Amino acid sequence: MKPTTATLLTGLLLITMSANAEIKPGTHQVGISVGAANPLSYHAVDGERAEFGSVGPTLGFSYLYQVRPTLSLGADLNFKRLGDKDLRTGQGPVTVESSAWTLLAIGRGDILPDSDLRPYGLLGLGLGGVKREIRYSASPRLDRDQTSGGFAAAVGAGLDFDISASWLAGAELRWNYINTEASEVGTGSVRTLDLQFKAGYKF
């Protein structure tokens, strides 16, 4: 084995052995996440049916408080900028720009609380909102912005890896739901499937 390879493997082993997360009741965790959101809903624009945006970036912030070794409670704020969609309607070419946000109370269950690799599942309930900006290239007078808000929920699963006793990295797959009934955004709900990569700090 080359010295460089041996040094890297030794360093990785030392990091893994020294992480020793010790997730105990009373531990706080703050985190930031970035990723991509894939829309799963469809909406109507001047009679034309189209996917509610396209794959776009997400940014999230979270706080968790460890109630038990396997259970933490907290809150989560997430923003999504869904990609633009170009349509052709009876009013001519249209570009629709879509975005969404959620503010959720989070309950999370850790499957292996004493391990440096911790798979988990979560459930979130709270509020959310969506916005679509409709732009007509041939008839700008018809341009309009429409928003809606309502009940929101999320179900997800992920994996945390403890880099050290305080720092962690991870990934999460999350299904999101925002109720938009009785609104102007052309759909009864907006749903997305998000893949997020995160960094966190425990204290």
Image (tube, rainbow, N blue to C red):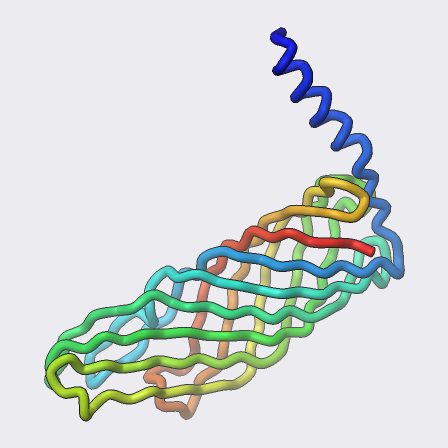
Q: Is residue 1 left or right of residue 180?
A: right
Specify whether 107 is left or right of 104.
right
- Give the percent coordinates (x, y) of residue 140: 18, 87
Along the line of sight, which residue is nearer the eye, 113 or 163? Answer: 163
Is 108 located above or below residue 169 in the figure? below
Q: Residue furthest right?
A: 25
Most extreme residue toward the front, as rendered? 4
How many labels, in total?
0
**Residue 10 at x, y = what percent?**
72, 20
Residue 3 position within the rendered picture, expressed as x and y whole percent measured from the top left: 65, 10
Location of residue 41 (image quadrant): bottom left
Q: Position of residue 1 (x, y in %)?
A: 62, 7
Residue drawn 77% across and 27% down? 14
Question: What residue is drawn where x is 44% and y is 87%?
Answer: 148
Q: Residue at x 63, y 74 (%)?
A: 104
Instruction: Give residue 98's quadrant in the image.
Output: bottom left
- Name the residue: 55% across, 77% down: 152
